[in-house]
Image (spheres, grey):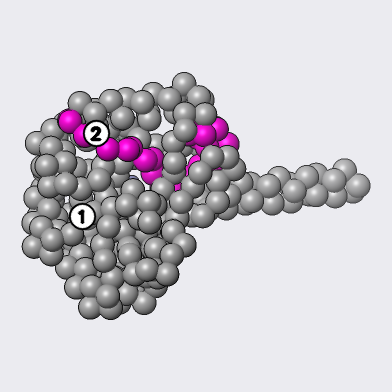
Amino acid sequence: MRLINRFLLLVLMLTCIAILLFMASRSEDKQLMGTLIDRVNTNRKVVALTFDDGPTPEYTQELLGILKAHDIKATFYLVGKVIERNEDETRAILNAGHEIGNHSWSHPRMVFKSQQFIANEIESTDKVIRAAGYSGVIHFRPPFGKKLVALPYYLNKTNRTSITWDVAPERRLGDMATTEEIVEYTLANTKPGSIILLHVMYPSRKNSMQAVAGIITGLQAEGYEFVTVSELIKR
Ligand SMILES: [Zn+2]
């Protein structure tokens, strides 16, 4: 009986530890080491619009068209192996004057991975971003926002800043969110210095793509200026 109790206690403890590790790994505003920025403290109405994944041939031009029509600059966290496949789309983003960041080579969950694995994922992606002709600072955004020990350790060691977000309509509302809901949530939750996360590079994210214009005009009507993440940090 006593043995069973001890066993149950152990299982309970391990479960608690697993839950805590899981919560820590997906925290949007905390990281064990190094610099993580989820928003910038400012009174000025500046905001950064960020797009994760891609650049896919199907959706890059459409998104660039929307950003150009509203004359704003955004920040793109691109996946290394997708950059390698889609050089034209990468250059189009770069030539339009947007900021490019590193979103890993193969978009893995970067927890419980070796330093070598993490180094490969990050360095090879920086390399293809540079090969495309990008000369700005390259920040890192962890795939799925996941990080625990090894990834922050490597980022800190190599002096890289992690960028997450404080406004993530798709993560909060779920996959079934309508365009109106995405716009409404974003307008309601954006504050001066916010970093907004959107995914528009897939067929399943049509509602997000259609929300981009509404988010821009809605926030501009409230007096917001759109800047890249690097500019946001500078201010
Ligand atoms: Zn991603």
Q: Is mark 1 within 8 Å of ligand 1?
A: no
Which amino acid, mark 1?
Answer: Lys
- 190 relative to 92 in the view: left or right: right
Residue 63 is covered by the magenta coloring: no
In the image, residue 115 sits, relative to residue 107, either above or below, namely above
Q: Position of residue 108 (x, y in %)?
A: 39, 37
**Alpha-carbon distance for marks 2 and 1?**
16 Å
Quarter occupied by residue 198: bottom left
- 157 relative to 136 in the view: left or right: right
Q: Residue at coordinates 90% horizontally, 48% vertically from top-left?
A: 1
In the image, residue 94 sits, relative to residue 131, either above or below, namely below
Which amino acid, mark 2?
Answer: Ser
In the image, residue 43 sits, relative to residue 109, either above or below, namely below
Marks 2/1 in contact by CB < 8 Å: the verdict is no
- 11 relative to 91 in the view: left or right: right
Q: Residue at coordinates 37% horizontally, 28% vertically from top-left?
A: 121
Residue of label 2:
135
Q: Residue at coordinates 34% horizontally, 69% vertically from top-left?
A: 45
Provide the secondary structure element on which disc 1 rests.
loop
Q: Residue at coordinates 74% horizontally, 51% vertically from top-left?
A: 12
- Does residue 214 appear in this view? no
Range covered by the magenta-colored residues: 132-156
